Image: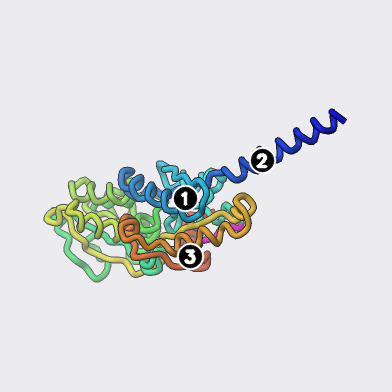
């Protein structure tokens, strides 16, 4: 009888421990490092607090050093939610069956890349990409960026019928949009491809010397950033958890928090919204 009581007590204790650990499990998210780390920590530290309050679970933001690292963290279940660009979101969802794009910024269905140029390059505003660009130096952002690499490369190839390194005398990858602006402003590169929201934000903050660098061309619109969530979160955090996360993101209305993205708000998203991005990435060999 004593052995039976001890056995039942052990089972009860183990069950209680499991229930506690399940209840205490941390919901982890990340984001592509499209700007300098200080801005990202400020932005997503605030998102962490907001989600924790809305979801009633412990939430943690983990920064990563590259776009590829964000995709890997999602693939390996180190994070369950991520703020991806169009390309990185496509890459992540292809690697994790059942994952879904659930929310995007109001501006994200109609996103753009700006081509910026140093004034010393002699380049001015143009309606389309012309041979004036040939022989200049050019920098993309990150190799995994939609606005900093995928779409600008697509439009360069479309305009010239050649790869970027055949059009420009030197091609580089800055790593993020903030750095692209700095490199072009300094004259390290003649031209750079930059996320239009980052450009506008930097200009608004007087962080760009527009006497040294200016926008010379704007791409057509395309879909870009989105929040993507793993398909197994309900199993891990309880039925309906994915919907709760979705609603928390869609209901985000704190002007200060939204300004940090910067976005006017968030609207529903679906995987199908990024079909054109996926097709473009396949045509350039950027997805398997």
Disc with the residue nearer the chain's start (1 vs 3): 1
Q: Which of 68 and 14 lies nearest the eye of the viewer? A: 14
**Which image quarter: residue 1?**
top right
Q: Is residue 76 visible?
A: no
Measuring 43% from the left and 64% from the top, which residue is drawn there?
251
In the image, the segment drawn in magenta is 98-103
User: In this figure, which residue is indicated by the disc labeled 2?
Assistant: 18
Up-down relation of residue 3 to residue 171 (above or below): above
Q: Residue furthest top?
A: 2
User: In this figure, which residue is indicated by the disc labeled 3?
Assistant: 274
Up-down relation of residue 241 to residue 8 (above or below): below
Disc with the residue nearer the chain's start (3 vs 2): 2
**Do the CB atoms of the residues marked 3 and 2 lie less than 8 Å apart?**
no
Q: Assign a secondary structure to mark 3.
A: helix
Q: Which of 233 and 181 lies nearest the eye of the viewer? A: 233
Q: In the image, which is nearer the foreground, mark 3 or mark 2?
A: 2
Location of residue 265 in the rendering, given as x and y in whole percent from the top left corner: 37, 65
Measuring 35% from the left and 55% from the top, which residue is drawn there?
148
User: In this figure, which residue is indicated by the disc labeled 1?
Assistant: 52
Disc with the residue nearer the chain's start (1 vs 2): 2
Location of residue 230 in the rendering, given as x and y in whole percent from the top left corner: 56, 54
- Per the model, the C-alpha gap separating discs 1 and 3 is 28 Å
**Which image quarter: residue 147?**
bottom left
Q: Which of 22 and 175 lies nearest the eye of the viewer? A: 22
Indicate yes or no whether the magenta region holds residue 129.
Answer: no
**Which image quarter: residue 4?**
top right
From the viewer's perspective, tell me whether residue 105 is left or right of residue 217: right
């Amino acid at each position: 009888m004593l052995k039976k009581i001890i056995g039942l007590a052990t089972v009860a204790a183990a069950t209680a421990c499991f229930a506690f650990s399940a209840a205490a499990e941390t919901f982890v998210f990340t984001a592509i490092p499209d700007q300098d780390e200080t801005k990202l920590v400020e932005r997503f530290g605030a998102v962490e607090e907001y989600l924790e309050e809305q979801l009633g679970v412990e939430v943690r933001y983990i920064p990563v050093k590259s776009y590829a690292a964000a995709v890997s963290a999602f693939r390996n279940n180190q994070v369950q939610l991520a703020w991806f660009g169009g390309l990185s979101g496509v890459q992540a969802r292809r690697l994790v069956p059942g994952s879904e794009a659930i929310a995007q910024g109001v501006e994200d269905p109609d996103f753009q890349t700006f081509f910026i140029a140093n004034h010393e390059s002699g380049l001015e505003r143009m309606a389309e990409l012309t041979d004036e660009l040939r022989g200049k130096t050019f920098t993309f952002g990150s190799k995994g960026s939609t606005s900093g690499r995928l779409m600008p490369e697509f439009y360069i190839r479309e305009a010239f019928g050649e790869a970027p390194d055949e059009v420009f005398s030197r091609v580089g990858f800055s790593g993020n949009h903030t750095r692209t602006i700095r490199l072009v402003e300094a004259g390290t590169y003649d031209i750079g491809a930059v996320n239009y929201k980052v450009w506008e934000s930097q200009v608004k903050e007087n962080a760009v010397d527009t006497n040294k660098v200016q926008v010379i061309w704007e791409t057509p619109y395309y879909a870009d950033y989105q929040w993507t969530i793993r398909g197994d979160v309900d199993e891990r955090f309880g039925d309906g958890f994915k919907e709760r996360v979705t609603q928390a993101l869609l209901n985000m209305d704190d002007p200060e928090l939204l300004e940090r993205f910067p976005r006017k708000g968030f609207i529903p998203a679906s995987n199908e919204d990024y079909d054109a991005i996926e097709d473009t990435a396949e045509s350039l060999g950027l997805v398997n």
